[in-house]
Image: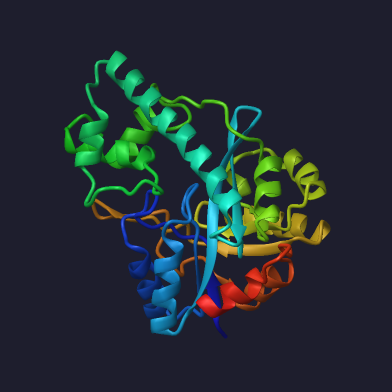
């Protein structure tokens, strides 16, 4: 049997590896497919598609869109969108501007708490310069805090400062999950709710299904076995596609976040279910384009 890992991050957002690295690791893990789902950007997709072609593994174009509902971060995964769609790219750029605003607000909070750190120091801790369509996030701030000696571990950075209950946590207004679903569908993609076990807001699922949600990430590195059973039942109830993903972000200081590529996987036939759920885009056969890229 061939398996797919449908949730991984690269340097284009807050991962530590290049898109090519992710594809290579997936190949070495014996996977049949890997999705590249960076936060609010598709900047790593084309490189991954090229690597997939060279290494003989199916690469699924994806994205993880940041949204907020009732003050809680909710992430919506999108698959098989036309990742060159101009309207979609413009919308993602708007989301990245909000993310940049959030980063600056967190740095202000840290400075007020007596933890001096600048955006220049955050960028200096990166392996390479970020491009305009790539994202900076909390893990990069955590790296800088660690390098400056303000915390002993990345986990401490999130527990003390950057996590939901951290002293420097802020959450500026963002789009609703329903808006992300609409954006993904309008770009010809398939929207899936990421790691629902992290939110504790199962009451959101049914309204999102009514908005066009097509799947749930049932199997995730941070889900317990009981949660996997629970969300599989919800997926079956609403006839949603059950997906799986490691949420791989690479290795930081000897620790892999969230888990290694292939540690959470599902039969590659699920990729075909996602393909069948795609939305047509007037004037372009984006499915054909995506398949040719892999």
Q: Position of residue 232 (x, y in %)?
A: 71, 60
Q: Residue at x 41, y 33 (%)?
A: 100
Q: Give the camera-side residue of 181 and 271.
A: 181
Residue 144 position (above or below residue 22): above
Query: Based on the displayed image, in which of its 4 quarters is residue 237 positioned?
Result: bottom right
Q: Position of residue 158 (x, y in %)?
A: 37, 35
> From this viewpoint, is residue 48 visible?
yes
Q: Position of residue 62 (x, y in %)?
A: 54, 60
Q: Viewed as shown, does residue 75 lie left or right of 213?
A: left
Q: Viewed as shown, does residue 210 lie left or right of 114?
A: right
Residue 52 position (above or below residue 81): below
Q: Viewed as shown, does residue 3 lie left or right of 18?
A: right
Q: Residue furthest front?
A: 283
> From this viewpoint, is residue 223 visible?
no
Residue 293 position (above or below residue 166): below
Q: Position of residue 219 (x, y in %)?
A: 59, 60
Quadrant of the snapshot with the N terminus: bottom right
Q: Residue at x 73, y 40 (%)?
A: 204
Residue 156 position (above or below residue 222): above
Q: Residue at x 55, y 82 (%)?
A: 2
Q: Residue at x 77, y 52 (%)?
A: 212
Q: Viewed as shown, does residue 159 lie left or right of 69?
A: left
């Amino acid at each position: 049997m061939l398996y797919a890992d449908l949730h991984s991050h690269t340097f284009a957002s807050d991962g530590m590896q290049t898109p090519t690295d992710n594809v290579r690791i997936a190949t070495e893990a014996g996977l049949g497919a890997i999705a590249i789902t960076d936060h609010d950007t598709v900047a790593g997709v084309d490189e991954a598609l090229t690597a997939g072609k060279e290494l003989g593994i199916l690469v699924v174009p994806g994205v993880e869109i940041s949204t907020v509902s009732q003050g809680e971060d909710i992430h919506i995964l999108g698959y098989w969108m036309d990742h060159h769609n101009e309207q979609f790219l413009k919308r993602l750029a708007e989301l990245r501007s909000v993310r940049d605003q959030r980063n600056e607000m967190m740095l202000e909070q840290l400075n007020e708490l007596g933890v001096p750190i600048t955006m220049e120091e955050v960028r200096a801790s990166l392996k390479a310069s970020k491009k305009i369509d790539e994202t900076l996030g909390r893990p990069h701030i955590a790296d800088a805090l660690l390098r400056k000696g303000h915390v002993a571990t990345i986990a401490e950075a999130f527990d003390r400062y950057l996590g939901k209950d951290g002293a420097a946590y802020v959450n500026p207004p963002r789009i609703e999950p329903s808006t992300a679903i609409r954006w993904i569908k309008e770009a010809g993609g398939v929207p899936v709710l990421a790691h629902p076990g992290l939110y504790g807001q199962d009451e959101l699922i049914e309204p999102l299904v009514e908005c066009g949600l097509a799947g749930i990430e049932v199997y995730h590195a941070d889900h317990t076995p009981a949660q996997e059973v629970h969300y599989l039942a919800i997926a079956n109830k609403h006839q949603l596609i059950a997906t799986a993903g490691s949420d791989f972000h690479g290795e930081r200081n000897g620790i892999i976040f969230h888990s290694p590529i292939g540690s959470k996987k599902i039969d590659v036939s699920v990729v075909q279910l996602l393909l069948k759920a795609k939305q047509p885009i007037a004037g372009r056969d984006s499915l054909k384009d995506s398949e040719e890229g892999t």
